[in-house]
Image: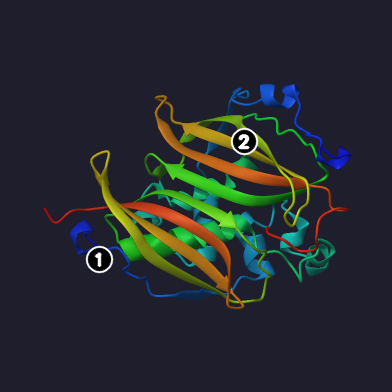
Amino acid sequence: MSRYYEDVRVDDELEPVEKLPTEDLAIDFFGRDNPTNPAFADAEAGRRMGIGGALVPGVLKMSWMTQYVNDWAGAEAEVGSIRVAFRRPDVAGKPLVLMGRVVDKRQEGGKNVVELEVVTIADGEPSVRGNITVALPSRG
Amino acid sequence: MAEDEQSLITDEHRALIGVPGEPSTVVVREADAKRMRDVLGDTDPRWADGTGMAPPYVIAFFGGRGGGGGRATPQLLPGAILTQQEWKFSRPFKIGEELKAVGQVFDIRERLGGRYGHSVLVTTSTDYYDADGQHVAASLLTITQFDPARAGRGGSE
């Protein structure tokens, strides 16, 4: 399904999606043969950092956010950028809810660009805030 | 200015800003793309098996494949945590293509107060170019450096 630029309005909201990050998911994301931050797989290492358990990798959350907007935008869209601020650490085993909203639409460099604000919510509080731009096809 | 509010950023640090590192290369590997797709449960047909394309988030792994672009990140304080990150895409990634990575220190600034106390924010960027020299993508990340002994507990990633 394609989503067209003309059909998108500022303040349109995306359907929330829940993700469950786990230690295994983090290890598999980077690959079991690739060394990464021990706090991603070891709850004790995370606790030593002052976090309540294993840390959810930031790039895993960014990837989920990118996928979330790609799924909403459809097969003819192209993500142009994602910029995020990590507000709080997320702990493996706690569900994350992705929510998104259209905050702008504009013509830019010959493209029909839609900008969305996407946030991950854990325990009712935002943990990552991001802005994602995506170019959409036109009906014209 | 109190002693602990003296700037930690020297002219040497400032001189690093904007200086490109020694370019490195990174290959967009099918195994990485497939593994990441599978973990995310991404069934988008544009980068399914056999399409020759990779999902945009494969850029998350370039640093781990030597694609940091030779940037030297100054370490001013012992603690470090990722606080901001950005990816930009000029075009989609193709499986198997070799990209030239060029990294640099983009900015260094200081912050007094807040949950980390006196902290230093180092932003680095890496640009990726294809064999024709065309820009493919960029990654920027900001690491907040801090002294764990002076910072509050917890905080952002």
Please give left or right for residue B33 compared with residue B68 in the image.
left
Name the amino acid type tagged 1. Answer: Met
Name the amino acid type tagged 2. Answer: Gly
Determine which of the numbered discs, if any, sits on residue B68 in the image. 2
Determine which of the numbered discs, if any, sits on residue A21 in the image. none
Residue B37, horizontal then vertical, whole percent: 49, 60
> Could you tell me which residue is drawn at 80 percent across and 63 percent down?
B153
> Could you tell me which residue is drawn at 53 percent across and 54 percent down?
A84
Q: Quadrant of the C terminus of chain B?
A: bottom right
Mark 2 packing: few (<14 Cα in 10 Å), some, or many (20+)? many
Please give left or right for residue B56 compared with residue A105 in the image.
right
Given contact means CB atoms under 8 Å apart, are the residues at marks 2 and 1 in contact? no
| Residue A12 visible, this orientation | yes
> Could you tell me which residue is drawn at 26 percent across and 64 percent down?
A9
Which subunit holds the residue at mark 2?
A: B
> Could you tell me which residue is drawn at 46 percent across and 74 percent down?
A17
Q: Quadrant of the N terminus of chain B?
A: top right
Which subunit holds the residue at mark 1?
A: A
- Please determine whether, in this image, residue A21 is positioned above or below residue A73: below
Please give left or right for residue A25 compared with residue A137 in the image.
right
Q: Quadrant of residue A86?
A: bottom right
- From this viewpoint, which residue is outermost toward the left? A140
Determine which of the numbered discs, if any, sits on residue A1 in the image. 1
| Residue A34 visible, this orientation | no
The lab-note entry on whether marks 2 and 1 share a chain reads: no
Which structural element holds mark 2? loop
How many numbered circles are shown?
Answer: 2
Mark 1 packing: few (<14 Cα in 10 Å), some, or many (20+)? few
Residue B155, horizontal then vertical, whole percent: 72, 61
Which structural element holds mark 1? loop
**Spatial CA span between label 2 and label 1:** 36 Å
- Please determine whether, in this image, residue A118 is positioned above or below residue B55: below
